[in-house]
């Protein structure tokens, strides 16, 4: 009688988790699995061969370079913006914070369009630059610009909370000990930001790697020039080359999985260290 | 190193957090700014440190005007209430930070940090991080760090506010010993009266951005300049009264319009003047006998008694409907030197004509 009760209780405690898996299966897990199934349908040989074409190698390399550059630039810009928003007081600070976070709310394709309208051949700045022989759109620089724009809030979102939580007395203590603002940033603020910076950079990198909407607008999707991995996948799908598209998609999925595992690991470690050091 | 603060003020919006405050601190002196939270005491300290700029007034360090000097150039040591030990550095690195900024050679830095850790009673803990230390230990580290580069002035903002009572008492004693041993001029902020009295050479009572009284602890306690000060340091019974006679020897005050009490000494009050008369609960004794002619006395009925361990506090309803608190040491009952009193018992309350405080309302 008692055993039956225990068994029933065990079953009922597992029900919510079971339901979650059931819902997630068609939504997340099966689509992901199908990418790998399709990628490997022609065998490992075919999968490998479809990855070593010039187009694929360029797209993957280009995507990684852009993602890396975006992460580095946004680490600097995002930290600066977070510092200004968190540590200085000026009228319109709240509003500026909202504006800087806007890219999250705006559809990426709209970001791409707006960049085109500004920097494109008929755009406000584009028209001024054209006589000088400068055409910023449909170049790697345009892709970088779009990615910086789109991923900017991720760095801000991970660094600013750390700065908000960092009590001003740490900085004040450093000042009274004779440290300049820069020395205080270098020795006191920056070490506290490391975890947030790393997490933010990986988040930015991962988002940049998968960015499509803004990239397709500003890059012109030019193979071997501005074609990123997601654009390559899209082009191959459009032309019916499912195997090639899925091979690159599988690589991107694996890369993203590794990146997010790293982010989760780092977040857990920073949290633990923070608790240990009483931050 | 002496400090002279001249008429400094700080306003936030229309509210004056610090209002024309003047203070002087002698070389090697330890002064305490005592006040409740929001009184402006920390703001005064932060203005001395250069973390806040005053709207008006001057701060002179050894005669040199430092009012507008940034905190980096003042050469002061500051201990924060939360200690602010840098969590990314070891204890030794924390202590050496100020010296590192001053480009002191590493060997010298390490020797100094080891010496300071010994001085504050934490030898050999240099390799630990702040989270591995107790609150009391962190407080000692914060003190060692502030003293590392031999500051001209030490500023302590509620340095014992975040530790438990027992540790606080231990830390108080070692803090005073260290500060006096080094001889550094020190300004400390606290809301704890006991702490202030134990540590301070002089105490400044801060209220609503102003200094109510600045003087020796015993003076502040027994001869407070204002009603606020009398009330803020320790417990006190207040009565409204008027002066009926004032001679070279004593002053006569009538409470409730007719009950005379006396205060020995030549006091600056004249007959007819309205005053506040105060007497502290521990200065009063309860008796069944009438007072002698050289004593003050008033009678009433015991309305309430509360046991506090070391003392019992009685509230006595006076004939004129006033209420007066009296404190009796419990060991007097145990030793048979005083009788426990019953509720509703009619008693005399007696105190010396040498005690009692007269304040202008």
Image: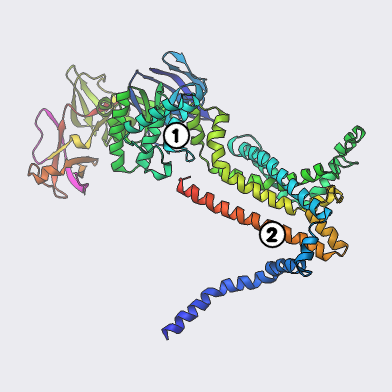
Asked if disc 2 and disc 1 are in contact, CB closer than 8 Å, the reply is: no
Q: Are marks 2 and 1 on the same chain?
A: no
**Position of B116 relative to A243 (above/below):** above
Secondary structure of the residue carrying numbered label 1: helix
> What residue sits right under mark 1 in the picture?
B94
Instruction: Specify whether B271 is left or right of A277.
Output: left
Q: Quadrant of the N terminus of chain B?
A: top left
Furthest residue to the right?
A131
Q: Position of residue B114 (x, y in %)?
A: 37, 31
Residue B288 among magenta residues? yes
User: Which of the pair A24/B5 is nearer the observer?
Assistant: A24
> Which residue lies at the image location 47% right of the left edge and 40% below the top edge?
B87
Instruction: Specify whether B97 is left or right of A120.
Output: left
Q: Which mark is residue A254?
A: 2
Observer-side mark, 2 or 1, equals 2
Instruction: Specify whether B333 is left or right of A20.
Output: left
Secondary structure of the residue carrying numbered label 2: helix
Chain letter behind tag 1: B
> Which residue lies at the image location 75% right of the left edge and 67% below the top edge?
A40
Q: Please state the extent of the stretch shown in magenta in the rendering.
A: B287-310
Chain letter behind tag 2: A
Marks 2 and 1 sit apart, C-alpha to C-alpha, by 43 Å
Q: Position of residue B31 (x, y in %)?
A: 34, 25
**Position of A80 relative to A232 (above/below):** above
Residue A121 among magenta residues? no
């Amino acid at each position: 009688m008692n055993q039956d009760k225990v068994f029933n209780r065990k079953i009922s405690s597992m029900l919510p988790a079971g339901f979650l898996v059931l819902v997630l299966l068609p939504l997340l897990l099966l689509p992901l699995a199908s990418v790998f199934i399709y990628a490997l349908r022609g065998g490992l040989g075919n999968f490998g061969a479809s990855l070593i074409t010039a187009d694929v190698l360029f797209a993957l390399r280009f995507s990684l370079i852009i993602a890396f550059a975006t992460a580095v630039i946004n680490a600097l810009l995002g930290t600066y913006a977070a510092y200004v928003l968190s540590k200085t007081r000026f009228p319109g600070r709240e509003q500026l914070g909202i504006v800087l976070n806007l890219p999250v709310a705006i559809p990426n394709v709209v970001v791409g369009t707006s960049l085109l309208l500004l920097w494109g051949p008929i755009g406000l700045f584009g028209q001024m630059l054209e006589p000088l022989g400068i055409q910023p759109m449909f170049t790697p620089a345009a892709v970088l610009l779009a990615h910086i724009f789109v991923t900017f809030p991720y760095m801000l979102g991970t660094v600013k909370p750390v700065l908000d939580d960092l009590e001003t007395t740490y900085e004040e203590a450093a000042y009274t000990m004779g440290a300049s603002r820069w020395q205080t940033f270098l020795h006191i603020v920056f070490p506290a930001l490391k975890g947030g910076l790393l997490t933010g950079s990986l988040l930015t990198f991962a988002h940049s790697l998968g960015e499509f909407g803004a990239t397709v607008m500003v890059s012109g999707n030019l193979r071997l020039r501005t074609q990123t991995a997601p654009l390559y996948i899209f082009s191959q799908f459009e032309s019916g080359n499912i195997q090639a598209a899925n091979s690159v998609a599988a690589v991107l999925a694996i890369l993203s999985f590794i990146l997010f595992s790293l982010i989760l690991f780092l977040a857990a470690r920073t949290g633990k260290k923070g608790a240990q050091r009483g931050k | 190193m002496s400090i002279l603060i001249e008429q400094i003020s700080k306003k936030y919006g229309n509210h004056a957090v610090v209002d024309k405050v003047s203070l002087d601190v002698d070389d090697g002196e330890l002064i305490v700014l005592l006040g409740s939270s929001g009184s402006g005491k920390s703001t005064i300290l932060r203005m001395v440190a250069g973390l806040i700029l005053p709207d008006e007034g001057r701060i002179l360090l050894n005669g040199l005007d430092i009012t507008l000097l940034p905190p980096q150039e003042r050469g002061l040591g500051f201990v924060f209430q939360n200690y602010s030990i840098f969590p990314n550095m070891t204890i030794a690195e924390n202590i050496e930070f100020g010296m590192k900024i001053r480009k002191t050679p590493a060997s010298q830095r390490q020797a100094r940090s080891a010496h300071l850790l010994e001085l504050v009673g934490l030898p050999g803990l240099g390799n630990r991080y702040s989270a591995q230390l107790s609150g009391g230990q962190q407080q000692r580290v914060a003190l060692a760090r502030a003293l590392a580069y031999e500051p001209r002035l030490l500023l302590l903002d509620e340095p014992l506010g975040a530790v438990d009572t027992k540790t606080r008492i231990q830390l108080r004693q070692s803090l005073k010993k260290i500060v006096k041993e080094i001889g550094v001029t020190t300004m400390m902020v606290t809301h704890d009266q006991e702490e202030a009295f134990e540590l301070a050479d002089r105490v400044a009572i801060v209220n609503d951005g102003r200094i109510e009284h600045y003087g020796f602890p015993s003076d502040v306690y027994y001869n407070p300049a204002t009603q606020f000060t009398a009330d803020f340091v320790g417990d006190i019974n207040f009565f409204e009264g008027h002066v009926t006679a004032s001679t070279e020897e004593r002053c006569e005050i009538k409470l409730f319009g007719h009950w005379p009490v006396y205060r020995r000494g030549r006091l600056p009050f004249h007959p007819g003047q309205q005053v506040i008369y105060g007497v502290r609960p521990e200065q009063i004794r309860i008796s069944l006998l009438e007072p002698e002619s050289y004593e003050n006395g008033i009678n009433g009925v015991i309305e309430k008694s509360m046991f506090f361990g070391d003392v019992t506090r009685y509230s006595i309803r006076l004939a004129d409907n006033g209420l007066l608190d009296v404190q009796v040491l419990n060991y007097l009952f145990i030793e048979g030197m005083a009788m426990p009193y019953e509720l509703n018992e009619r008693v005399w309350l007696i105190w010396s004509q040498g005690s009692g405080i007269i304040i202008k309302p």
